Image (cartoon, rainbow, N blue to C red):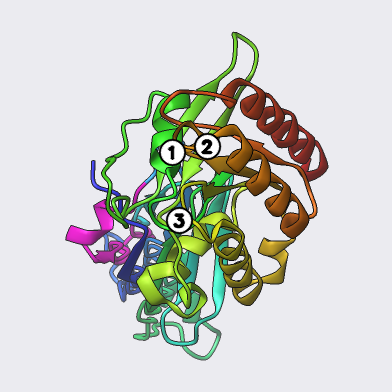
Amino acid sequence: MRFLDQAKIHIASGAGGAGCVSFRREKFIPMGGPDGGDGGRGGSVWAECAAGLNTLIDYRYQQHFKARNGQPGMGRQRSGASSPDLVLKLPPGTEILDETSGEVLGDLTQPGQRLLLAKGGDGGRGNVHFKSSTNQAPRRADPGWPGAERTLRLKLKLIADIGLIGLPNAGKSTLLAAVSAAKPKIADYPFTTLHPQLGIVRLDAEREFVLADLPGLIEGAHEGRGLGDRFLGHAERCRALLHVVDGTEAAAVRNYRAVRKELEAYDPALAAKPEIVALNKTDALTKPVVARKLAALKRAAKCEAMAVSGVSRAGLDRLLDRLHRLARAQEGEDG
């Protein structure tokens, strides 16, 4: 299934049914009073967070959604049937914005959560409601109230325990493939990963967490370069970050600082998330070089940097244990 994290849709709720103008006419009651029924309510449009979805691909091929109108009223004070509501199923992590005003209408994070997007129109009143002592045969009935229309923008930000961040070609996809059953595309050129990838990391029967491989960031990502603002949006949902630095690069510390600068520029709250720094591709380095680069990264990050290799799996067990403990600690704070 193709991953799609943004979509634009147009929705319209149903109009209410018209009220009925009718009079009671029976064999021995030739001049009966008004008995027109009310119109039915038009269908509303709802958004519902559904478990098991992780893409907005369904909203690429269909962008227009309209609920049905209510049925008109009938004689003998019979009300028209109300139309069923239209429910749009969206994956957890979907943010819904009004396309015209930019207002955030809602943020769906928990399965089962519902949000009213457009209320259906009420049905019109039949002529039985307009009977009075001075007007015993009213020929007036209300039309149904119109529905609402609006254009919405859907933005999906994946929810994961740990988000993998770093410059392109830092080895994030290799790490994800080494520790989970995910099968991301892996190649020796930048921007191999064009869409976020999710993987479940299982340490044992009782310990697991969700790891998200986010496409590599570049300078100016917070302004949208390389689609970076969309990638950073996914990182917002992660409880903590794993910052992967390519150990084979001569300017490892500068690369680390470049990514941190983009996080700060995009959202200081994102930069403040707990972070673990991993020096990757250490299988291609000598021990003295690894030690020197780890010390430099520790000074720059002001926290311990861990040496790992996605190819040889060196250091991964210790790293995963720390990531699990960090994810559970953040889950406790969120709860």
**Magenta extent:** 55-80
Residue placed furthest toward the left = 61
Q: Which amino acid does label 1 sit on?
A: Leu
Query: In what element is the residue under mark 3?
Result: strand
Residue placed furthest toward the top = 205
Which residue: 40% across, 57% down? 168
Name the residue carrying label 3.
47
Query: In what element is the residue under mark 2?
Result: strand
Q: Is residue 302 above or below residue 311?
A: below
Mark 3 or mark 2, which has the lower sequence index?
3
Instruction: Bin the neighbour count of mark 2 within 10 Å (Cα to Cα): few under 14, some 14-19, many 20 and up.
Output: many
Whether the residues at callouts 1 and 2 have beta carbons within 8 Å, the answer is yes
Name the residue carrying label 2.
211
- Quadrant (top left, top right, bottom left, bottom right) of the N terminus: top left
Is residue 57 found inside the magenta-colored segment of the image?
A: yes
Q: Nearer the viewer, mark 3 or mark 2?
A: 2
- Quadrant (top left, top right, bottom left, bottom right) of the C terminus: top right
Residue 137, given in percent of the width and then of the height, sits at 39, 83
Residue 186, given in percent of the width and then of the height, sits at 29, 40
**Within the image, what quadrant is residue 218 found in?**
bottom left
Residue nearest the viewer, comparing 71 with 230: 230
Residue 47, given in percent of the width and then of the height, sits at 45, 56
Name the residue carrying label 1.
198
Which residue: 52% across, 25% down? 201
- Quick check: can you spot residue 171? yes
Mark 1 or mark 3, which has the lower sequence index?
3
